[in-house]
Amino acid sequence: MTAILSLTEQLQSFSGGDREVAEAVLREVLPRLHQIAVRELHRERYVAPLSPTELINEVWLRSLGRGGWKINSREHFFAISSLAMRRVLVDFARARLAAARGFGEIHDSLDDHGSLAAGSPDPNTIVQIGVLMERLEKVNPQWAMIVDMHYFVGFTLEEIAENAGLTRRQVKHLWTKACNWLKDQMDA
């Protein structure tokens, strides 16, 4: 008799190369992936002419479906998924810019709370955010993880603290530092 695995165990098995569990994993994570995709596409609605399902399929085909990810928990999986969605949207924005040969200066910036200024970012901004997040991952991977989990995935600071083994105060401090770094980079 086969034991019933938790989602975290299924994700870990999947990341270890077990292709038989892929369909069950996808079925279970699809509702949350759809929520993340809707939020990402709403935030960047002028960048990619995709539906949430198309974005999920693109992410699955490009990276998640191939496996090889070291997944520690369901929250980690959703953070990786959000990062993959962001990269797909950055690629779409880059392609759009390449087709139009550029649009000029970027004017969006982070507000005082570390959020993108109101309005839908244009392809230049999406590319800039993608580039800055890649740089941030090299400068401080922990900051990048917190930005991904909070801004892109939508986890609260408390949820991040619980999953990262940190206190809420530590996460808030790291979030503030990451936002300040991003704001400085965007203003430069």
Image: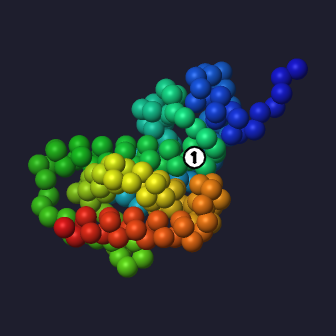
Residue 29 sits in quarter: top right
Viewer-nearest residue: 135 or 119: 135
Left or right, residue 61 beside residue 32: left
Q: Amino acid at mark 1?
A: His
Left or right, residue 50 beside residue 33: left
Q: Is residue 187 visible?
A: yes
Q: Position of residue 153 (x, y in %)?
A: 52, 56
72 shown above or below 102? above
Residue 160 sits in quarter: bottom right
Residue at the image point whose x is 51% and y is 61% from the top: 150
122 shown above or below 34? below
Residue at the image point whose x is 65% and y is 28% from the top: 13
Q: Split into 4 quadrants, where in the image is the C terminus?
A: bottom left
Q: Is residue 119 visible?
A: no
Residue at the image point whose x is 59% and y is 26% from the top: 16
Residue at the image point whose x is 75% and y is 38% from the top: 6
Q: Which residue is mark 1?
A: 76
Q: Position of residue 72 (x, y in %)?
A: 61, 41
169 shown above or below 85? below
Q: Position of residue 44 (x, y in %)?
A: 37, 58
Left or right, residue 185 beside residue 161: left
Q: Position of residue 138 (x, y in %)?
A: 34, 48
